[in-house]
Amino acid sequence: MKTLILSAIILLFGITSCNTGTKQNSTSSVTGNGTEQITAKAPSATASSTEGIIDSYIKLKNALTQDDDQDAAIAGKELIASLDSFDKSSLNEAQAKEYTDIYEDAREHAAHIGANAGNIKHQREHFETLSKDVYDLVKAVGGTQKLYYVNCPMYNDNKGANWLSEIKEIQNPYLGKQMPECGTVKEELN
């Protein structure tokens, strides 16, 4: 009898643990004919790819293009989580070394951005170095999407700065709404 009860408890525990954490995010919308349409979002990137890091970086870049320091702070914190969850075990030795060299610096700049909602100038200063780190990471490890390496020659008293973009159209994160189209594509990364 004890064996039967113990087996039932183990089976119940196994069933419930298999069901936790497997829900996919979904959105629903009402179509023109009044029916609800549910669209599943793609599952999040595996920790061994750069997709999560790049997605968080792009969210940050897009927030800065809109002069949105609050969303930039949120994206900075999300980028920290993406950096922390990255699994470098699938990288070769040279790639793992490059990631290790980039990690601390990128995490520090993302943390500054995340902690400085209300100070977009400070966020943009850290975004400049963060962009160099993410560019180096993409060059060393690769990515899952086409990216554009863009330069703004006017930022920082005409010293200039670069960033990565998911679109070829210029949307400047350094000058935001003040000069949204300032910049030129310097390189395409596949």
Image: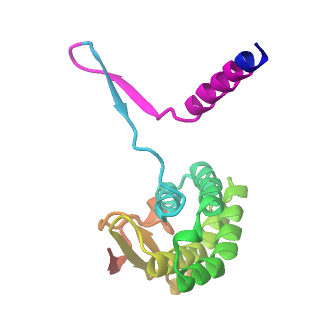
Q: How is the image coloured?
A: rainbow
* Magenta span contains residue 98: no
Residue 132 coordinates in the image, percent (x, y):
54, 79
Give the vertical position of 20 relative to 50 (above or below). above
In the image, farthest residue toward the right: 2
Residue 129, by quadrant, is bottom right
Let me know if residue 162 appears in the view.
no
Residue 76, by quadrant, is bottom right
Quadrant of the image for the C terminus? bottom left
* Magenta span contains residue 27: yes
**24, 2: nearer the viewer:** 2
Give the vertical position of 144 relative to 153 (above or below). above
Q: Is residue 22 left or right of residue 150?
A: right
Q: Residue at x 78, y 17 (%)?
A: 2
Span highlighted in magenta in the image: 6-33
Q: Is residue 181 left or right of residue 155?
A: left
Give the vertical position of 186 relative to 49 (above or below). below
**9, 20: nearer the viewer:** 9
Residue 117 coordinates in the image, percent (x, y):
68, 53
Residue 103 coordinates in the image, percent (x, y):
65, 73
Residue 107, by quadrant, is bottom right
Residue 68 coordinates in the image, percent (x, y):
55, 52
Quadrant of the image for the N terminus? top right
Q: Residue at x 62, y 26 (%)?
A: 16
Q: Residue at x 41, y 29 (%)?
A: 27
Q: Is residue 173 left or right of residue 37?
A: right
Q: Is residue 184 left or right of residue 82?
A: left
Q: Residue at x 43, y 78 (%)?
A: 152
